[in-house]
Amino acid sequence: MKKIATIMSVYKDDKLSFLKEALSSLYNQTEKSDIYIQLDGSVSEEIESFLNSGLADGKIKYLGKRDKNLGLSVSLNELLQIVLPKYTYIVRMDADDISEETRIEKQVSFLESHHDIDAVGGWIEEFNMDTDERQVVRYGEYHDALKQNIMKRNPLAHVTICFRNSFFDTISSYDTTKLNEDYDLWIRAFKDDVKLHCLQEVLVKVRTSNDFFARRKNIKRAKEVMFLKFDATRTFGFGIKGYLYAVAHFVLFLSPSTVKRYLYKKMRN
Protein backbone atom coordinates (compact mmCIF):
# COMPACT_ATOMS: atom_id res chain seq x y z
CA MET A 1 0.00 0.00 0.00
CA LYS A 2 1.30 3.45 -0.96
CA LYS A 3 1.91 5.75 1.99
CA ILE A 4 1.59 9.40 0.92
CA ALA A 5 1.77 12.55 3.04
CA THR A 6 1.22 16.13 1.92
CA ILE A 7 2.99 18.83 3.94
CA MET A 8 1.86 22.45 4.13
CA SER A 9 2.85 25.53 6.13
CA VAL A 10 0.23 28.17 7.02
CA TYR A 11 1.06 31.64 8.36
CA LYS A 12 -0.68 34.89 9.31
CA ASP A 13 -0.80 36.43 5.81
CA ASP A 14 -2.59 33.45 4.26
CA LYS A 15 -6.21 34.06 3.31
CA LEU A 16 -8.95 31.69 4.45
CA SER A 17 -10.66 31.58 1.04
CA PHE A 18 -7.39 30.62 -0.67
CA LEU A 19 -6.61 28.03 2.00
CA LYS A 20 -10.03 26.46 1.53
CA GLU A 21 -9.40 26.13 -2.22
CA ALA A 22 -5.95 24.66 -1.64
CA LEU A 23 -7.23 22.05 0.79
CA SER A 24 -10.27 21.30 -1.36
CA SER A 25 -7.90 20.50 -4.23
CA LEU A 26 -6.17 17.99 -1.93
CA TYR A 27 -9.40 16.46 -0.61
CA ASN A 28 -10.55 15.88 -4.21
CA GLN A 29 -7.37 14.17 -5.43
CA THR A 30 -7.80 10.91 -7.31
CA GLU A 31 -4.93 9.57 -5.16
CA LYS A 32 -5.50 10.48 -1.51
CA SER A 33 -2.79 11.55 0.92
CA ASP A 34 -2.60 12.27 4.63
CA ILE A 35 -2.40 16.03 5.17
CA TYR A 36 0.10 17.46 7.67
CA ILE A 37 -0.03 21.19 8.42
CA GLN A 38 2.26 23.37 10.51
CA LEU A 39 1.12 26.80 11.68
CA ASP A 40 4.13 29.08 11.26
CA GLY A 41 3.22 31.40 14.13
CA SER A 42 -0.16 32.74 15.18
CA VAL A 43 -2.89 32.89 12.53
CA SER A 44 -6.36 34.42 12.46
CA GLU A 45 -9.09 32.86 14.59
CA GLU A 46 -11.09 31.96 11.50
CA ILE A 47 -8.19 30.07 9.92
CA GLU A 48 -7.35 28.23 13.13
CA SER A 49 -11.02 27.34 13.66
CA PHE A 50 -11.30 26.06 10.08
CA LEU A 51 -8.18 23.92 10.44
CA ASN A 52 -9.28 22.61 13.83
CA SER A 53 -12.54 21.48 12.21
CA GLY A 54 -10.60 19.70 9.48
CA LEU A 55 -8.50 17.97 12.11
CA ALA A 56 -11.56 16.93 14.10
CA ASP A 57 -13.36 15.41 11.11
CA GLY A 58 -10.26 13.55 9.92
CA LYS A 59 -9.61 15.49 6.72
CA ILE A 60 -6.39 16.79 8.24
CA LYS A 61 -4.08 14.21 9.82
CA TYR A 62 -1.89 16.56 11.85
CA LEU A 63 -1.95 20.24 12.83
CA GLY A 64 1.17 21.62 14.48
CA LYS A 65 0.94 24.91 16.36
CA ARG A 66 3.44 27.45 17.69
CA ASP A 67 3.17 31.15 18.42
CA LYS A 68 6.40 32.30 16.80
CA ASN A 69 6.88 32.78 13.06
CA LEU A 70 10.11 30.94 12.13
CA GLY A 71 9.80 30.68 8.35
CA LEU A 72 8.83 28.14 5.71
CA SER A 73 12.01 26.04 5.86
CA VAL A 74 11.67 25.54 9.63
CA SER A 75 8.02 24.52 9.24
CA LEU A 76 8.83 22.04 6.46
CA ASN A 77 11.66 20.51 8.48
CA GLU A 78 9.34 20.10 11.47
CA LEU A 79 6.82 18.26 9.30
CA LEU A 80 9.50 16.15 7.62
CA GLN A 81 10.67 14.90 11.01
CA ILE A 82 7.16 13.55 11.58
CA VAL A 83 6.36 12.09 8.17
CA LEU A 84 9.66 10.66 6.94
CA PRO A 85 9.63 7.60 9.22
CA LYS A 86 6.03 6.78 8.21
CA TYR A 87 5.57 7.64 4.53
CA THR A 88 7.11 6.62 1.23
CA TYR A 89 6.11 9.76 -0.68
CA ILE A 90 5.96 13.38 0.50
CA VAL A 91 4.05 15.99 -1.51
CA ARG A 92 4.70 19.74 -1.20
CA MET A 93 1.79 22.14 -1.23
CA ASP A 94 1.39 25.86 -0.49
CA ALA A 95 -1.63 27.27 1.32
CA ASP A 96 -2.78 29.46 -1.59
CA ASP A 97 -2.22 27.21 -4.62
CA ILE A 98 -4.51 24.71 -6.33
CA SER A 99 -3.42 21.19 -7.29
CA GLU A 100 -4.90 19.53 -10.35
CA GLU A 101 -7.05 16.61 -9.20
CA THR A 102 -4.79 13.94 -10.76
CA ARG A 103 -1.55 15.57 -9.58
CA ILE A 104 -0.63 13.16 -6.79
CA GLU A 105 -1.75 10.09 -8.74
CA LYS A 106 0.47 11.00 -11.70
CA GLN A 107 3.51 11.82 -9.58
CA VAL A 108 3.32 8.76 -7.37
CA SER A 109 2.67 6.54 -10.38
CA PHE A 110 5.78 7.96 -12.03
CA LEU A 111 7.94 7.35 -8.97
CA GLU A 112 6.53 3.83 -8.60
CA SER A 113 7.73 2.99 -12.09
CA HIS A 114 11.01 4.97 -12.05
CA HIS A 115 12.93 3.82 -9.00
CA ASP A 116 16.03 5.83 -9.94
CA ILE A 117 14.15 9.14 -9.53
CA ASP A 118 13.98 10.67 -6.03
CA ALA A 119 11.79 13.71 -6.69
CA VAL A 120 9.40 14.70 -9.46
CA GLY A 121 7.80 18.06 -10.21
CA GLY A 122 5.66 19.53 -12.95
CA TRP A 123 4.70 22.73 -14.73
CA ILE A 124 2.68 25.49 -13.09
CA GLU A 125 -0.03 27.77 -14.40
CA GLU A 126 0.26 31.25 -12.91
CA PHE A 127 -2.95 33.28 -12.79
CA ASN A 128 -3.02 36.97 -11.94
CA MET A 129 -5.82 37.66 -9.47
CA ASP A 130 -6.02 41.33 -10.55
CA THR A 131 -6.11 40.87 -14.32
CA ASP A 132 -7.01 37.16 -14.73
CA GLU A 133 -3.98 36.89 -17.06
CA ARG A 134 -2.62 33.34 -17.20
CA GLN A 135 0.76 31.91 -18.10
CA VAL A 136 2.02 28.34 -18.15
CA VAL A 137 5.56 28.13 -16.76
CA ARG A 138 7.41 25.19 -18.30
CA TYR A 139 10.46 23.40 -16.93
CA GLY A 140 12.88 20.91 -18.47
CA GLU A 141 12.06 17.23 -18.27
CA TYR A 142 15.15 15.14 -17.56
CA HIS A 143 17.77 15.35 -14.83
CA ASP A 144 20.62 16.65 -17.01
CA ALA A 145 18.44 19.37 -18.56
CA LEU A 146 17.23 20.45 -15.11
CA LYS A 147 20.83 20.61 -13.90
CA GLN A 148 21.81 22.81 -16.84
CA ASN A 149 18.81 25.08 -16.26
CA ILE A 150 19.90 25.86 -12.70
CA MET A 151 22.40 28.26 -14.26
CA LYS A 152 19.51 30.45 -15.44
CA ARG A 153 16.69 29.96 -12.95
CA ASN A 154 15.06 27.65 -10.46
CA PRO A 155 15.00 24.31 -12.32
CA LEU A 156 11.84 23.01 -10.63
CA ALA A 157 8.74 24.60 -9.11
CA HIS A 158 8.99 23.83 -5.40
CA VAL A 159 5.19 23.85 -4.99
CA THR A 160 4.83 20.97 -7.47
CA ILE A 161 7.29 18.53 -5.93
CA CYS A 162 6.61 14.98 -4.82
CA PHE A 163 9.60 13.50 -2.98
CA ARG A 164 10.51 9.89 -2.45
CA ASN A 165 11.50 9.69 1.23
CA SER A 166 14.99 8.50 0.20
CA PHE A 167 15.62 12.00 -1.17
CA PHE A 168 16.11 13.15 2.41
CA ASP A 169 18.47 10.29 3.23
CA THR A 170 20.99 12.18 1.11
CA ILE A 171 19.90 15.81 1.40
CA SER A 172 18.83 15.64 5.06
CA SER A 173 16.61 18.75 5.30
CA TYR A 174 16.06 22.34 4.24
CA ASP A 175 18.77 24.86 5.14
CA THR A 176 16.97 27.22 7.53
CA THR A 177 19.64 29.90 7.08
CA LYS A 178 18.63 30.39 3.44
CA LEU A 179 15.92 32.74 2.16
CA ASN A 180 15.88 30.77 -1.11
CA GLU A 181 15.59 27.36 0.50
CA ASP A 182 14.30 25.66 -2.66
CA TYR A 183 17.10 26.89 -4.94
CA ASP A 184 19.65 25.81 -2.33
CA LEU A 185 17.92 22.42 -2.10
CA TRP A 186 18.24 21.77 -5.84
CA ILE A 187 21.92 22.76 -5.90
CA ARG A 188 22.66 20.31 -3.09
CA ALA A 189 20.62 17.62 -4.86
CA PHE A 190 22.62 18.02 -8.08
CA LYS A 191 25.90 18.03 -6.13
CA ASP A 192 24.99 14.67 -4.60
CA ASP A 193 23.58 13.35 -7.90
CA VAL A 194 20.10 12.89 -6.47
CA LYS A 195 17.95 12.23 -9.54
CA LEU A 196 15.20 14.71 -10.41
CA HIS A 197 12.50 14.75 -13.08
CA CYS A 198 9.70 17.04 -14.24
CA LEU A 199 6.41 15.89 -15.76
CA GLN A 200 5.62 17.92 -18.86
CA GLU A 201 2.19 19.15 -17.83
CA VAL A 202 0.57 21.60 -15.43
CA LEU A 203 0.17 20.10 -11.97
CA VAL A 204 -0.45 23.19 -9.83
CA LYS A 205 -2.16 26.54 -10.37
CA VAL A 206 -0.31 29.39 -8.63
CA ARG A 207 -1.68 32.80 -7.67
CA THR A 208 0.10 36.03 -8.59
CA SER A 209 -0.97 39.69 -8.45
CA ASN A 210 0.07 43.09 -9.75
CA ASP A 211 2.18 43.76 -6.65
CA PHE A 212 3.97 40.40 -6.89
CA PHE A 213 7.15 41.93 -8.32
CA ALA A 214 7.21 44.90 -5.96
CA ARG A 215 7.07 42.50 -2.99
CA ARG A 216 10.05 40.55 -4.34
CA LYS A 217 12.46 43.50 -4.27
CA ASN A 218 14.63 42.17 -1.47
CA ILE A 219 18.37 42.92 -1.67
CA LYS A 220 19.36 40.25 0.82
CA ARG A 221 17.42 37.61 -1.10
CA ALA A 222 18.86 38.85 -4.40
CA LYS A 223 22.43 38.65 -3.10
CA GLU A 224 21.84 35.15 -1.80
CA VAL A 225 20.57 33.94 -5.19
CA MET A 226 23.58 35.48 -6.92
CA PHE A 227 26.03 33.73 -4.59
CA LEU A 228 24.13 30.45 -4.93
CA LYS A 229 24.43 30.80 -8.71
CA PHE A 230 28.17 31.50 -8.32
CA ASP A 231 28.43 28.28 -6.29
CA ALA A 232 26.52 26.31 -8.93
CA THR A 233 28.70 27.78 -11.69
CA ARG A 234 31.92 26.76 -9.92
CA THR A 235 30.60 23.30 -9.05
CA PHE A 236 29.07 22.37 -12.40
CA GLY A 237 31.49 24.19 -14.69
CA PHE A 238 29.08 26.63 -16.33
CA GLY A 239 31.94 29.03 -17.06
CA ILE A 240 31.64 32.74 -17.70
CA LYS A 241 28.06 32.35 -18.89
CA GLY A 242 27.04 31.14 -15.42
CA TYR A 243 28.55 34.20 -13.73
CA LEU A 244 26.87 36.52 -16.23
CA TYR A 245 23.46 34.94 -15.55
CA ALA A 246 24.08 35.31 -11.80
CA VAL A 247 24.86 39.02 -12.04
CA ALA A 248 22.00 39.63 -14.51
CA HIS A 249 19.58 37.97 -12.12
CA PHE A 250 20.77 40.24 -9.31
CA VAL A 251 20.22 43.33 -11.46
CA LEU A 252 16.77 42.04 -12.46
CA PHE A 253 15.81 41.64 -8.80
CA LEU A 254 16.54 45.32 -8.20
CA SER A 255 14.85 46.61 -11.37
CA PRO A 256 11.51 48.49 -11.42
CA SER A 257 8.45 46.25 -11.21
CA THR A 258 7.40 46.95 -14.80
CA VAL A 259 10.78 45.79 -16.11
CA LYS A 260 10.74 42.69 -13.92
CA ARG A 261 7.21 41.81 -15.04
CA TYR A 262 8.16 42.02 -18.73
CA LEU A 263 11.42 40.04 -18.43
CA TYR A 264 9.88 37.50 -16.06
CA LYS A 265 7.23 36.63 -18.64
CA LYS A 266 9.80 36.38 -21.44
CA MET A 267 12.22 34.23 -19.43
CA ARG A 268 9.55 31.79 -18.19
CA ASN A 269 7.86 31.04 -21.53
Image: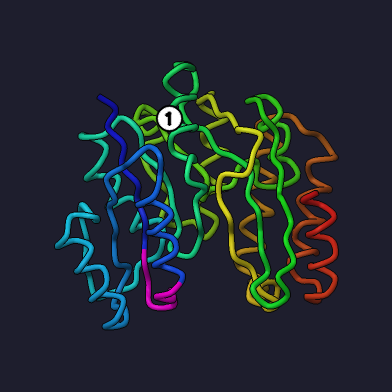
> Quadrant location of residue 104?
top left
Considering the whole magenta stretch, tell me its main secondary structure.
Answer: loop
- For the point 48% across and 65% down, the residue is 96
- For the point 72% across and 51% down, the residue is 136
> Quadrant location of residue 249?
bottom right
Task: Out of 37 and 84, give the one closest to the viewer.
Answer: 37
Apparent side of residue 63 relative to residue 227 in the rendered image (left or right): left
> Quadrant location of residue 242?
top right
Please determine whether, in this image, residue 104 is positioned above or below residue 51.
Answer: above
What stretch of residues is rendered in magenta? 10-17
Q: What element does badge 1 sit on? A: helix
- For the point 26% across and 68% down, the residue is 51
Q: Name the residue under label 1.
A: 108
Q: Does the magenta stretch include residue 15?
A: yes
Task: Out of 20 and 72, give the one closest to the viewer.
Answer: 20
* Amino acid on which the number 1 mark rests in the picture: Val
Residue 205's x, y, as percent? 58, 55
Name the outermost residue toward the left.
56
Apparent side of residue 142 relative to residue 22 in the rendered image (left or right): right
Quarter placement of the N terminus: top left
- For the point 24% across and 56% down, the residue is 60
Q: Does the magenta stretch include residue 183?
A: no
Residue 26's x, y, as percent? 39, 51
Apparent side of residue 207 relative to residue 244 in the rendered image (left or right): left
Residue 20's x, y, as percent? 39, 67
- Sort mark 1 into few (<14), some (14-19) or many (20+) by Cα contacts within 10 Å: many
Apparent side of residue 77 relative to residue 239 in the rendered image (left or right): left
Residue 38's x, y, as percent? 29, 61
Indicate how the structure is coloured in the image.
rainbow
Please determine whether, in this image, residue 86 is positioned above or below residue 110.
Answer: below
Count the marks.
1
Please determine whether, in this image, residue 173 is positioned above or below residue 225.
Answer: above
